[in-house]
Image (cartoon, coloured by chain):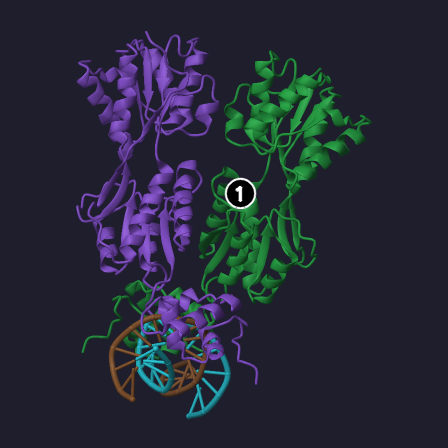
Chain colours: A purple, B green, C brown, D cyan
Amino acid sequence: MPPKRNKNSRITIEDIAQIAQVSKATVSYVINDKPGVSEPVRNKIKNIIEETNYFPNSAARGLAGEKTNFVGLVIPDISDMFYANIIRGVEKTLNKKEYLLNLFTTHARPEREQQVVRLLNKSMVDGLIIMAYFITDNFIQSLKEREIPFVFIDYPPKDEDIYSVMVDNENGAFEATEYLIKLGHKKIAFLEGPEVAWDSKARFKGYLKALETHGIKFNPELVENGNFTKEEGYTATKRLLEKGEKFTAVFSSNDQMAIGAIRALKESGYKIPTDVSIVGFDNIEASSIIEPPLTTVSQPIYEMGKKAVDIITALINGETIEEKRYMLKTKLIERHSCTKI
Amino acid sequence: MPPKRNKNSRITIEDIAQIAQVSKATVSYVINDKPGVSEPVRNKIKNIIEETNYFPNSAARGLAGEKTNFVGLVIPDISDMFYANIIRGVEKTLNKKEYLLNLFTTHARPEREQQVVRLLNKSMVDGLIIMAYFITDNFIQSLKEREIPFVFIDYPPKDEDIYSVMVDNENGAFEATEYLIKLGHKKIAFLEGPEVAWDSKARFKGYLKALETHGIKFNPELVENGNFTKEEGYTATKRLLEKGEKFTAVFSSNDQMAIGAIRALKESGYKIPTDVSIVGFDNIEASSIIEPPLTTVSQPIYEMGKKAVDIITALINGETIEEKRYMLKTKLIERHSCTKI
DNA sequence: CTGAAAGCGCTTACAG
DNA sequence: CTGAAAGCGCTTACAG
């Protein structure tokens, strides 16, 4: 009789065991690099696995309590490059480590974020990388109740116990503002993002700190909200202009708004950077293409994804990590939207 | 004794059965909307499921032969917006239909593409949406041997039997070229993509066809290869300029190259669109920001993802689909990079 | 209309 | 160093 095959005609651990004339357990030990198998037997089995192209069924492994080799990534959306780059960093690093990616988007809806926690248990993923908007204490509590490790990306947990990787937004904004100040600017407008965006807040803080450090008095008339969009960056700048409050530079807390600001400024007859200098934040693709090319702060987005994977895989393997919070540095990208005055 | 809980302290079908005082089978029938359960019992169970927040374990379902509610998406990369948008279309549509996404990137490496086929079996995903570069007959053969349905995105299968959703590149290029012709242009340069890119070829074909339709003789001196990148689009245009062969318009088979071309043209003192008109393909974000805003052909990328999901879910549910190949239409986006001559 | 039992492919004590 | 057996959470004939 030929070796029995399952319906899927897919090779199973049973087949390998039969071919190698050993028990399934022995094959399992080899697959999982566990002790208790003699070297010759181990090699024989490894060869058979190689030849037959056998690949263990993750679902079954997960069910039986072992690793699934999947890591879940929970992310609000994938439509903008920011998230796309994180996914890329996560995915590439995961691949190098022989893990697979399970992607869950929440579309920034709280129910979806909750659902994800219900859904993901040990038999589906070995660990979770989470980027969410509505992270409640409740959410974190349910997360902790599961046995799987998790890491937050780009979210500052109150809880000291939680692993997270973040970007130093405040310092990035500080450097950007300081750059403008060193160019001689004193009247620097600030374009802020949505109320709820903690990263916008951090950038505002950095802006304030730079002014203070250099003895420049903060003028609240010079800040306008542009909600992180191109369109509102445009209208915010128009408002700024109408107020008549003089400024020689703009620090926009993201590039999208900066692009809107450039359009508004040009429309009103201002030359950039001759009349107004401007620096953005994020270093999106468009910022190198716009005229003039925008000086901006680049975030190590890809690295965030990578670092999160490094942490989660270490955690999965039971390693301990000293530092629970990773703060990644930003980088100022000088282009042609600023000048000395 | 309190109801027994598994290690994960996660609710199982067993728990639900116990609470409802029925067998696991009955609960399973309810979960899967199968007949054989009386209405009152069904409702009772449904309520318990609701209250307990029970969610069946996909791994176990997959193993036991039922649906996993996962659909696998195999894609080369996620670093560019093109892929990111496809993922978005796929993911959103999947969510609406209560499916989850398993993402596999191949980084355009043949081994990875092969591996994916080995890896994905019925207990992991219910269906597969595939976007790959190296689709060999062999690959398709192994795919067919599995029991799971699959759809190709943006790939023209030779095999008539295979489901696929594509964009009508040829017609898009035809319309773009014709648009230029109707503006009075006769000497239209063509910037082509990589040799291996079938979409670039299709666009070239559309270009040729438009010339022919309008009785314009094709001049091979007017085509240069820019490999689909900004940089090579720039150098290709420089080469074109050096040749001294006159042209009044450029049709670039993607936007990246068009952006490079604009830079090259400007550098050499040409005004756009006064001296040279230019149209791109893809409608990437940068093309609306560049000066002048680029007229281009937009692809229904999101819709491709959506359509692929519609097909795969229908296939999963055993429905038959008349049309195996979907050809989606492009759209010409008029901006300010073209003018009459 | 409902339940007991086998089985999906794996891992993990446990016994030898 | 190796194997037989139980169990993970589910579904699906099968019997009643």
The residue drawn where x is 34% and y is 29% is: A227
Amino acid at pointer 1: Tyr
B3 to the left or right of A265 = left
Residue at position x 34%, y 54% in the image: A116
SS of the residue at dot 1? helix
Residue A179 image point, x, y percent: 29, 18
Q: Nearer the viewer, residue A292 or C10?
A: C10
| Residue position for label 1 | B302
Classed neighbour count for the residue bearing mark 1: other residues with Cα under 10 Å, few (<14), some (14–19), many (≥20):
many
Q: Quadrant of the N terminus of chain B?
A: bottom left
Q: Position of residue A204 (x, y in %)?
A: 25, 26
Quadrant of residue B273 in the image?
Answer: top right
Query: Is A12 or B88 nearer to us in this picture?
Result: A12
Q: Chain of mark 1?
A: B
| Residue A270 appears in view | yes
A140 is higher (above) or lower (below) than B265: below
Residue appearing at x 66%, y 46% in the figure: B327
- Decide which of B38, B172 is in the foreground and name it: B172
In the depicted structure, whether residue B36 falls above or below residue B284: below
Q: Is residue A326 left or right of residue B323?
A: left
Q: Is residue A34 above or below residue B152?
A: below
Where is residue B288 shown, x and y percent of the image?
52, 26
